Amino acid sequence: MTLAEKNEPGAGGRKRVVDLLARAERQELVAAWDKLAEKPAVQPVRGPETGLVMVRGRMGGGGAPFNLGEVTVTRATVRLASGSVGHAQALGTDREKARLSAIFDALWQEQTTQSFVEQALLQPVAARVADADRRKADETAATRVDFFTMVRGDD
């Protein structure tokens, strides 16, 4: 599978992988790392390093953009002995989380370990995130007020 094919939405592209790795919790990453039969040789390329990123917002989702504030982000880039390069960014200051996320990004790019990363890490994270989204939607729906307009008959 080529890099272009991996980025196709139907192929479960890399954008989805990076998103799920950023949403993964540290203990989920550590558990998947512990399950890995053969630990790859990892060379740090960049970081992990922590810095600030400006968050921009829009009023009502469509208004003029404005600077909302800064958030702390940790990023890492690693290279495996096989040559695969993995990148990761995560909110917060957890350097180990960023490092492990970058390693799993690189492992996902390899044919031999892609299915392991999908099954041991990405599917459980996706299920947890979907469950949290569903719970939040249910809580929000409980407070929803439906307004309607009554139509009067013609006088």
Image (tube, grey):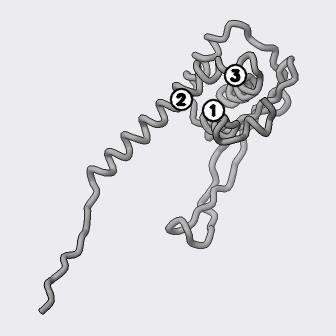
Tell me if residue 5 comes above or below residue 141 in the rendering: above
Circle nearer the viewer, 3 or 2: 3
Badge 2 element:
helix
Label 2 amino acid? Val
The answer to whether any part of residue 93 appears in the image is no
Circle nearer the viewer, 1 or 3: 3
Q: Identify the residue shown where x is 83% and y is 21%.
A: 80
Where's residue 75, x and y in %? 73, 37
For the C terminus, give its image quadrant: bottom left
Q: Identify the residue shown where x is 65% and y is 28%.
A: 97
Category of crowding for the residue at label 1, using alpha-carbon neighbours closer than 10 angstroms: few (below 14), some (14–19), many (at least 20): many
Q: Which residue in the protein does label 3 denote?
A: 114
For the N terminus, give its image quadrant: top right
Q: Which residue in the protein does label 1 denote?
A: 21
Q: Identify the residue shown where x is 63% and y is 49%.
A: 71
Badge 1 element:
helix
Q: Which residue in the protein does label 2 denote?
A: 125
Label 3 amino acid? Gln
